[in-house]
Image: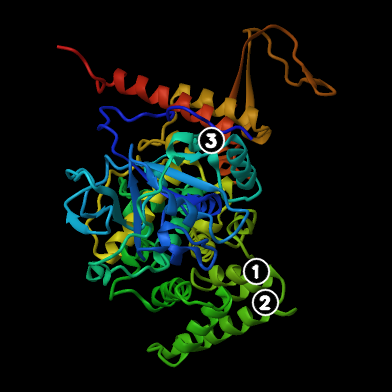
Amino acid sequence: MNTKIGTPKKPRSRRKPARIWHLVTNHQNMLYMLAAGMVMGPAGFRGKHYSDPLSVYPGWIPLFRDKVNIPADALKHATSERKHLLPCIASFDLSDLSGPVRMLSRDGRMRDVASPAARKCKDEIAILVRAPLPPTLLLSVNFFTPEDRQAFESAANDVSNVDLSSHRVEIAESLFSADTEVAWPAVQPQKQLFEDGNDNFPAFGQALGGVLAMLHHTANRSDLGLAAFRLVTGAARGKDSDIVQSDPILAELPNWMVGGEISGQADTRARLFWGVIQSLVVAQTQERPQTPIDVALAYLENQLDLLREMEFRPRLERLIADMRGLLGLGGGTITELLERHKGSLSRPLLLFCLREHCTDLLEFSHPLLNDAEYILAGILFGVRDSWLQLPKELRDPDMSAYVAFRMVDAEHRKQGENLAMSAPPRPKSLREIFTSPSGEWNSMKKDVAVELASKCNWNDCIQTRITLAEGNLPESFERKGLQVVLPGRVTTVKEEVDEVKFLHRLGQWPPIAPQIESEVRKKLGSLQEIEEKANGNGSSCG
């Protein structure tokens, strides 16, 4: 497996001077944090954390000062629990991070400072930052030997939810030059500083990440999906809000994305659906949570006696009975179930019992399902899988960076913390890039669409327009095998794409190969720059 080493593909312009700090951990913990899209405390690992310096200050991330030898005890701590663990040092650039942190001195004294950029005293060796942090601040993952790095890359290659392509994995022997005179963990005479340092599983953040990933994919499937994704990423335009508001359950999506709650005016179906969502999130904070389907059923059954609309009760009872039936051998065919239960509450919940993971849903289609029902099913599946369990196919690098920021931001908001950092660019689905507010496709976009359809073998999207020279045109044509014989001279042959069929293909599973999609995005980006200059929006010198 090749790991990219060097500068990132898209360096930030006018970047602030780097402020480098180092996290000491082991390769297994590092893999888990990359999969989770969060640098977090032990509680975030759900029992899979190997003791390391993150264990010392619950809910805080200890980052050691650059160009100062790391305590030898910290390195030993990171690999003390198991013999197979490899020491690993993750280097972070905190130049983009602002907000209060705590400085840690060699003898364990601490002081609050306004930001990581605060002036450091000579004996201060580390800072403590409130967890979690996003991997977008990660400069590199460092190992002592080539063998250790190779073992880390092999371990990453063995799991489905870690993609190292956007991370630098390096050998940095100098970082492992340890200071044997500094004790770790240091004496903590100011323990009262950590009374608020509770370490909790980031359940809402993880659920939010899963939902964003599924919304990003469903944005390729339909105009409603695109409107919903633009709305929750702060880029709504035109009638996006009105389109999303057309479904009473989906209308509450923006409210839930803010903090896990919906409006007090939500109707019964919306309260039940988002109540299931909240129950699934809360269950993840339990030490031994029930299965997601059991959580959903328990919530719905508890709501039966609380329903104000008595006419809704029989419908909910039938839905619960059929959901339970799907856990056994009964329940009927999928078509029978969808015909028996109509609406954007019942059908997503039935799919929740019929399929297990996000990719299972993305592979599924049925003519009875409408766009709103499919999107809401995607939300349920995204919450169940969470970002942690999503495979690489749903972890586009730009999407991953944006999701990591949103997850961490959501967790800090819930904690009432004031840490802040710049948001990565909002990812766009291919459907959004190909379409425009006017609905018109220019010739350049059509050419790129034809090229993409050809590379993906979407032959049903392509039609060939042949222009014949003027003259007596024949009424019929002769076909010889795969050839069409036309009498006379042909002046032009042009391939065209059926826009409706093409957009439908964009939303199908499996997704477009990453290399092909990357090439298409580059071409469309270049075309957008040309359009902006043609419209007078480009920069000019005066």
CA distance for labels 3 and 2: 38 Å
Neighbourhood count class around disc 3 (C-alpha, 10 Å): few under 14, some 14–19, many 20 upward: some
**Camera-nearest residue between 159 and 454:** 159
Note whether 440 is above or below 119 in the view shown: above
Q: Nearer the viewer, mark 3 or mark 1?
A: 1
Residue position marked by numbered label 3 in the rendering: 499
Task: Give the quarter of the image for residue 90.
Answer: top left
Q: Are marks 3 and 2 in contact (CB under 8 Å)?
A: no
- Residue shown at the point (27%, 68%) measured from the top left: 194
Is disc 3 placed on a helix, strand or loop? helix
Mark 3 is on which residue type? Glu
Residue 110, given in percent of the width and then of the height, sits at: 22, 58
Q: Answer whether residue 503 is visible to the viewer in this image.
A: no
Residue position marked by numbered label 2 in the rendering: 326
Residue found at the very far right of the displayed protein:
481
Neighbourhood count class around disc 1 (C-alpha, 10 Å): few under 14, some 14–19, many 20 upward: some
